[in-house]
Amino acid sequence: MHWRGHVGIALLAYAPVAAAVRAAGEPELAALGAAVAVGFSTVPDLDHRMPVAHRGPTHTVAFAVAAGAFAALAAAVALSAGDWTVFAAGGETALPPWTPAFVGGVATLSLCSHVAGDAITPMGIRPFRPILKWHVTFDLTPAANPRANRLFLGIGVAALALSVSLTP
């Protein structure tokens, strides 16, 4: 997939999480999660700018978990450095103390959605390397298919909008 497809798939994966977080009374955290999901959705493709094979180490579940843990750690350091407040409709509000774990979880989810998105292309991925050489491809659409990428972006945006609008 290309960036549009990956952003859409990440938003699609995040939509039920956003609804749950909004239902729990944390709409600002739900918005932060959407930003994290979008921000991490294309991180594995940074391998194009690195001296590693494309769809190599950055396209694994191990990378997703490690990068998610790093994101949680970075969020914890930022949280300990000062009060996390966001501007909401009713003024400033503080984010909950479990924000770092949430950020790490959403980052991991977004990165895993990237791996899943690449699994539907003919090239596929090896999600558990170097432990397993298992190759996954559903061969549904080429990564460069503009229609598929736009379709996934539209579905992801619609799913997030629907989940947020239907949540009290």
Image (cartoon, rainbow, N blue to C red):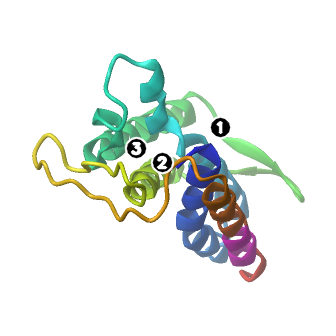
Q: Please, what is the three-letter code of the amino acid marked with disc 1?
A: Asp
Q: Say which of 2 and 123 sits in front.
A: 123
Looking at the picture, does residue 13 appear above or below residue 132?
A: below
The residue to which callout 3 is attached is: 68
Q: Please, what is the three-letter code of the amino acid marked with disc 3?
A: Gly
Q: Which residues are magenta?
A: 158-164
Assign the C terminus to one quadrant of the image: bottom right
Q: Residue at x 60, y 44 (%)?
A: 3
Q: Residue at x 16, y 54 (%)?
A: 134
Residue 149 image-quadrant placement = bottom right
For label 3, count other residues whose C-alpha is less than 10 Å away and answer few (under 14), some (14-19) or many (20+): many
The residue to which callout 1 is attached is: 83
Residue 125 on image: x %, y %: 30, 49
The label on residue 10 is none
Name the element at disc 2. helix
Distance from disc 1 to disc 3, alpha carbons, whole Å, reads: 22 Å
Distance from disc 3 to disc 2, alpha carbons, whole Å, reads: 5 Å
- Sequence order check, earlier mark of 3 and 2: 3
The residue to which callout 2 is attached is: 107
Looking at the picture, does residue 109 appear above or below residue 53?
A: below
Name the element at disc 3. helix
